[in-house]
Amino acid sequence: MTGKRRITAEDLNRLSVLTEVRISPDGERVAYTVQEAWVEEDKYRSNIYLVPATGGESVAFTHGDHQNTSPCFSRDGKWLAFVSDRSGKPQIWAMPTSGGEPRQLTSRPDGVISGPEFSPDGDRIVFVFRQKDVDEKDAKTDEEKKAIQRAKNAPRVVTRLRYKEEGWGFVPKERDHLWVVSVADGETKQITDGPYDHMGPHWSPDGKEILFAANRAEDPDFELNGIDIWTIPAEGGDVRKLPTQNGPASMPAFSADGKQVAYMGHSHPGDTWGMRNDRIWTTRPGGSQTCLTEDIDRPFGDWTIGDLRGAFHGGPPPSWSSDGKWIYAVLSDRGNTHLVVLPSSGGASKMLVGGNLDVAGYDVSADGKRAALLIIEPLGPGDVFSCAIDGDQAGATERLTHLNEGLLAELDLPEPEPFQFKNSDDITVDGWVIKPPGFSHGKKHPMIFQIHGGPHGQYGNIFFHEFQLLAAEGYVVYYTNPRGSQGYGEAFASAIDADWGNKDYKDVMEAVDAIVAEGYVDESRMGIAGGSYGGYMTNWVIGHTDRFKAAVTMRSVTNLESMFGSSDFGFELRNEFGGFPWENREGYRSMSPITYVDKINTPLLIIHSEEDHRCPIEQAEQLYAALRSMKREVVFIRYAAEGHGLSRGGSPAHRLHRLNHVVSWFKEHL
């Protein structure tokens, strides 16, 4: 297109990324959070903005080079609380929505604060806090700094099964606990205790109780899906368990009258990998639970994978209408995520906001008339929309922001095109193709096939910077949802249960056959890439065929048996692979790409992070050592101080470095 340029790797750090939306109780204003790369300091800054819910100019609510996140309105709409690190550590601050100076409410030690919510009367805020073991920022003298360093280097006595966690490293002694802070004087009180993690706090309408989800099993590490719904008095005291199904239950929300609770979950406690559909349930104290979506063979929550936000963030909890007759929730379906509404008494659901898009977040006003939405589109990295959810205009959306309008206007971005094929088992597999700018049907183009992680996630109709970058470099980019993906029903997602590398591999190779048959792909110049399970499948593919001329495997899995003991929850592999490794040794061996490493001849770039606790770097080390020992063409790039989500949340410099090396690798070999 005349006057426009192709997207570059550097454009990743020019994107403004919308991460949260919250609507005021009266439905008049929307607060939203925007994250931007602070390239000079090689980190990120986030600020909160306010925009009228019916359209108008956005106003910056917070300023500066800090992380300002998690906005929440008081019930009268006069205050906005948020989490900010402006004082050096994340704390809760509050400021009048009319403007003024922010006031610090909490003074917790170094740790993570999340989930703040005002009480109905606006006097208190509940939040979740997990304290770090060593508070380096409190060290003032050299002796204090030395003492902290000695503590960090001290021998670690491990007794927990799950003693490390992706994003944390070694888990701290403290768990995620609920705290309440007084808005008037900052007095703070911890209201939960014990060796349990507590999540998703939500006030009862009368302000007397706090609802939350927690795994309070005798030993939660041995029952990861033992998550239940509980309440606790707002002043602290004995917890009360609400009736739920046998299986995980999370993201609870009270109805407006406080008589019912809606939540998400499923009835398969043995499924820790996401094969089963999360459904919408209701429960009531002293009553029983009811599944409202038994007939909907799709997972609730947002299962779409991109490269601008964390994967599998799940979306927000279900929301109630003000009269208690309806429940709102997001649903993943064939590469899209929709906003749907369900009768709370049971019955058919209705789509409110759908189409080729991803409703990655939403919030419903207390008066039940309007919702704020975070919508991502194939050529839109994310903007704020408002939506009427009541009356004749229910479902009608209005765009409130154009966050990346200037940058997008510069770029020649090809629209991803749907590309379906029917596999040899007569199952339709969805895919998308991004053709390079200047594409011509009359010539052959090199192609890069991308495989998503999970495996129980989905690619879909969202903006994907990396895929647009590879298309801009002249490649046809093809990505699909093979069997094992979510968004297509439980049978589709569970088709690879204890059988990785079979039906999924078959779908990948038949997908390649389908696009080659279109006539515009140069079969002699095809590459393959993927991360996490996508890295597993990349390793598997090149261990079973020489069809691809270059490959990039990222944060990958190579040896299932060693991953059992090295991943942060590898011990749960037994639920995906037919038992413990010593019970199914041949199964683990036959499904591990390292078993076929001697068959790998494809030039391979291995990318892995040293602080990856989900797919530990020893997985990459095994693969690299084997290939290098056989003098195969392989390069290994290690990223210090990065975790599993490098491509989505690593430092700006490391993300740019990774992209440039991926592009260079394919340029060299394709």
Image: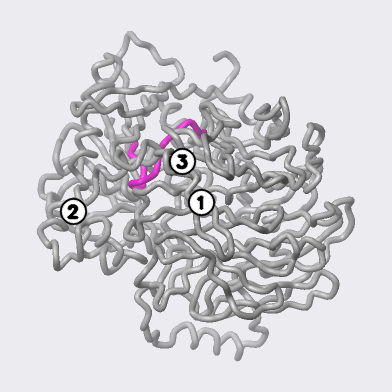
Query: Is residue 247 shown left or right of residue 395?
Result: left
Q: Which mark is residue 281?
A: 1
What secondary structure is found at the residue carrying circle 1?
A: strand
Number of the front mark, 2 or 3: 3
Asked if residue 182 shows in the view, the reply is yes
Residue drawn where x is 21% and y is 31% of the image: 509
Residue type at tag 2: Ser
Asked if residue 34 shows in the view, the reply is no
Where are the magenta residues, as a range?
450-463
- Determine crowd level at label 3: few under 14, some 14-19, many 20+ residues with C-alpha closer than 10 A: many
What secondary structure is found at the residue carrying circle 2?
A: loop
Q: Which mark is residue 304?
A: 3
Task: Depth check: give the residue in front, 326 or 196.
Answer: 326
Residue 545 image-quadrant placement: top left
Residue type at tag 3: Thr
- Up the image or down, 359 lies above or below 163; here it is above
Number of the front mark, 1 or 3: 1
Query: Is residue 59 shown left or right of residue 281?
Result: right
Q: Residue 141's spot in the image, x, y percent?
A: 66, 87
Magenta stretch mostly in which secondary structure?
loop
- Determine crowd level at label 1: few under 14, some 14-19, many 20+ residues with C-alpha closer than 10 A: many
Which residue is tagged 2? 592
Residue type at tag 1: Trp
Number of the front mark, 2 or 1: 1
Sequence-earlier tag: 2 or 3: 3
Q: CA distance from mark 2 to mark 1?
A: 38 Å
